[in-house]
Image: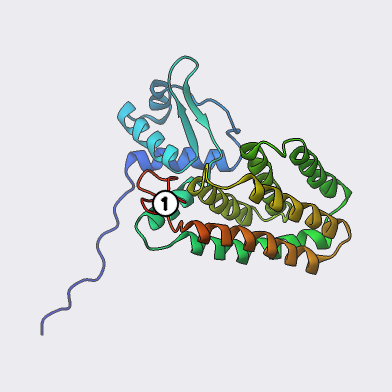
């Protein structure tokens, strides 16, 4: 009787650069290395880890790709601790968009799954400080009602702050990633009228949060996202162009 072929192969030791990257990652995530802190030079790191500079360079490249480190060139440059943990997530979603696996409609559906419940949660437990923070964003928007780009950025910050106020870092990271991809897809195309109508929704959402009305806050966020989604559909934009952030040919209004 012939013995069955083995289903598993021998476990291999981690490569040196993976061990170096794992050590640095742990120190960053544990707080031993602070945000913005500059790491020692490649030569110093190589000496400390007892490896070659090539190994250190590969470890840094891996951590830069995952958003843990940031490499800055030129005068005052070096390797710094970053906090762009959502970078791999953004890259993965961008690849799915460019490959046609998903569309911007899917991103809007995800926003509708995430943001209305988030707004309801915030409305159910927001304190005076959080309400004041949202009111400050509204006040900033009022000062730039004729500046389309700035108004849009402030409106986006409103959505970011709501996600952060849930206290769920994963939800905040997902919202931030989806928001940025949608913004990049229509940069320079949305009208000032759309931004102003969004601003009105935001004012009413803050009123609902101040009143502690989760149901109304949820309903208003759904209305806010719904009108913006319709605007995307009217423009015929369904995905990112080959340069990422530019509509594909035939989708411009």
The total of numbered circles placed on residues is: 1
Q: Is residue 38 left or right of residue 206?
A: left
Whether residue 52 is situated above or below residue 68 in the rendered picture:
above
Q: Position of residue 70 (x, y in %)?
A: 48, 32
Farthest top residue in view: 75
Splitting the image into 4 quarters, where does residue 231 fall? bottom right
Residue hosting label 1: 240
**Can residue 28 be seen here?**
yes
Q: Residue at x 34, y 57 (%)?
A: 99
Splitting the image into 4 quarters, where does residue 146 fall? top right
Q: Position of residue 92 (x, y in %)?
A: 42, 53
Front residue of this view, candidates 100 and 249: 249
Splitting the image into 4 quarters, where does residue 114 fall? bottom right
Q: Position of residue 119 (x, y in %)?
A: 73, 60
Q: Residue at x 36, y 60 (%)?
A: 100
Dot 1: few (<14), some (14–19), or many (≥20) neighbours within 10 Å? many
Front residue of this view, candidates 146 and 165: 146
Q: Position of residue 211 (x, y in %)?
A: 89, 60
Q: Is residue 204 left or right of residue 153?
A: right
Q: Residue at x 55, y 61 (%)?
A: 108
Front residue of this view, candidates 171 and 60: 171
């Amino acid at each position: 009787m012939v013995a069955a072929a083995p289903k598993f192969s021998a476990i291999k030791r981690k490569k040196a650069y993976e061990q170096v990257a794992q050590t640095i990652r742990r120190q960053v995530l544990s707080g031993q290395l602070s945000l913005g802190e500059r790491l020692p030079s490649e030569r110093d790191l190589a000496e400390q880890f007892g490896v070659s500079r090539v190994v250190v360079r590969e470890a840094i490249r891996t951590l830069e790709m995952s958003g843990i480190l940031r490499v800055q060139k030129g005068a005052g440059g070096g390797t710094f601790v970053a906090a762009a943990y959502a970078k791999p997530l953004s890259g993965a979603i961008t690849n799915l968009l460019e490959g046609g696996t998903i569309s911007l409609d899917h991103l809007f559906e995800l926003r509708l799954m995430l943001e209305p419940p988030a707004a309801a949660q915030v409305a159910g437990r927001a304190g005076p400080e959080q309400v004041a923070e949202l009111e400050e964003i509204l006040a900033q928007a009022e000062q730039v009602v004729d500046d389309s780009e700035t108004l849009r950025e402030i409106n986006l910050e409103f959505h970011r702050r709501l996600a952060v106020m849930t206290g769920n870092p994963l939800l905040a990271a997902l919202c931030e990633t989806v928001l940025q991809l949608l913004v990049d897809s229509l940069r320079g195309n949305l009208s000032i009228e759309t931004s102003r109508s969004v601003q009105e929704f935001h004012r009413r959402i803050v009123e609902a949060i101040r009143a502690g009305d989760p149901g109304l806050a949820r309903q208003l966020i759904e209305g806010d996202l719904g009108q913006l989604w319709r605007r995307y559909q009217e423009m015929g934009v369904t995905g990112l162009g080959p340069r990422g952030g530019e509509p594909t040919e035939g989708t411009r209004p």
